[in-house]
Image (spheres, rainbow, N blue to C red):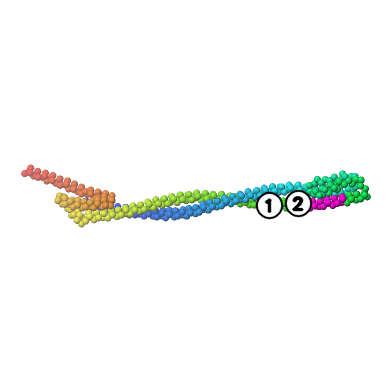
Amino acid sequence: PVQKVIQLMDGMLAKGKEEKHGEQVQFAAFKQFCDDTTVEKKRAIEEANEKIDTLKADIEKYTATAAMLTKEIAEHDEDISVWTGDQKAATKVRDIEKADYGTLHQDYSESVDALQRAIAVLRSQAHDRKQAVSLVQVSALKDLALIPESAKRTLDAFLQQDPEGLEVSAPEAHGYEFQSHGVIEMLEKLQDKFIDERTQLEKEEMNGKHAYDMLMQDLTAQIAQATQDREEKSEAKAKALQAKADAEGDLKDTTDTRDADQKYLDDLSATCEQKASDFESRQQLRAEEIEAINKAIEIISSGAVAGNSDKHLPSLAQQGGSSLAMLRSDTQNKMAQSRVVQFLSTKGRELNSRVLSALAERVSSDPFVKVKKMIKDLIARLMEEANEEAEHKGWCD
């Protein structure tokens, strides 16, 4: 029976060592997982932080770029508005100048034509009755706006003379002829003057038109360039704002992922630390349980207990039952069993070990119950036989 107890504890000892080793293997794999995952998550968090810094810088850059482009677009709009106004103003002035030129040029042309006709009349007309009718061409010059007032007075004086009744050889006739030459000379000078002024007017018109054309060409080019720049900057602004929106979305996703990784890492670190602490506690408990079982085996396998068991139990089997030897052996087994149970129970409470407590409970179960029952049954049967023999002998006697 003592050997059975020892075998029971040896089995528990082997099982404890096996479970202790199994926990070491399992924890080593878990610790490797913790280490690898921690390294991976820390690297991911570090990369996310770097990316977040980059995205924030990009967002600031895109914001500044969009603001700058907005300002430049407003400047282009202002320039285009001013230049368009300049075009309208220049066109309005040009229209007025052109209209004035047309009117004045027409006056010069009409005056030159009228002077040509009047000069021709004065040169070709003879002193006859028809002259009064022909001088209408000369009289018409007084209605022209460009004819100076002094010339108009001279013409009035010339036209007020009546050439009718003058003899050809009379001195008045020669005076009239001399005066007509003076009028012709005056009209020719006016004609030359008007032609020169008309030519100058045409040059000024040509220069004015050229200046207007150059101004319009320059303004049109500036407006076209400003419009192109505005369109390009509007497109660049739209791209900057889109890039900013994309970066903000990426920033949110990266931040959320980083925060999730950080929470996972914190939870993992806490779990790994707790499991490591639990593992150390279990390993210590396993070691102390193994030590306690070894001590229990040492107690029950001590020389006195083992010797007594080997001495008494075989003799008990050979002799078929000496009650004294049986009781002595039983008492010694009880003492050894009690010491082991007490030791295991005490260690179980100290270490809070369910294994040692369960083992103490199993050892406390009397392993000699069947042997004692068999011996008691044998003694009872022998006593019955002895009594029967005594009664039979008494009857015979």
Q: Is residue 326 left or right of residue 245?
A: left
Q: Is residue 83 magenta?
A: no
Q: Mark 1 or 2 closer to N-term?
A: 2
Find the residue positioned furthest to the left: 397
Q: Which residues are magenta?
A: 179-196
What is the distance, in whole Å, between disc 1 and disc 2 at their CAs?
21 Å
Q: Which residue is mark 2?
A: 201
Q: Is residue 109 left or right of residue 318?
A: right
User: Under tag 2, what secondary structure?
Assistant: helix
User: Under tag 1, what secondary structure?
Assistant: helix
Find the residue positioned furthest to the top: 395
Instruction: Give the crowd class for mark 1: few <14, some 14-19, many >=20 residues within 10 Å.
Output: some
Q: Main secondary structure of the magenta part?
A: helix
Q: Is residue 84 left or right of residue 102?
A: left
Looking at the rendered structure, the kind of residue marked 1 is Leu
Q: Is residue 189 left or right of residue 66?
A: right
- In the image shown, does 81 or 233 lie closer to the viewer? 81
Measuring 76% from the left and 53% from the top, which residue is drawn there?
200
Looking at the rendered structure, the kind of residue marked 2 is Leu
Marks 1 & 2, CB-CB < 8 Å contact: no
Q: Position of residue 319 (x, y in %)?
A: 15, 51
Q: Position of residue 132 (x, y in %)?
A: 87, 45
- In the image shown, does 43 or 195 lie closer to the viewer? 195
Residue 107 circle label:
none
How many badges with numbers are in the image?
A: 2
Q: Of circles 1 and 2, which is in front? A: 2
Measuring 79% from the left and 51% from the top, which residue is drawn there?
194
- In the image shown, does 41 or 23 lie closer to the viewer? 41
Q: Which residue is mark 1?
A: 215
Q: Position of residue 69 (x, y in %)?
A: 57, 51
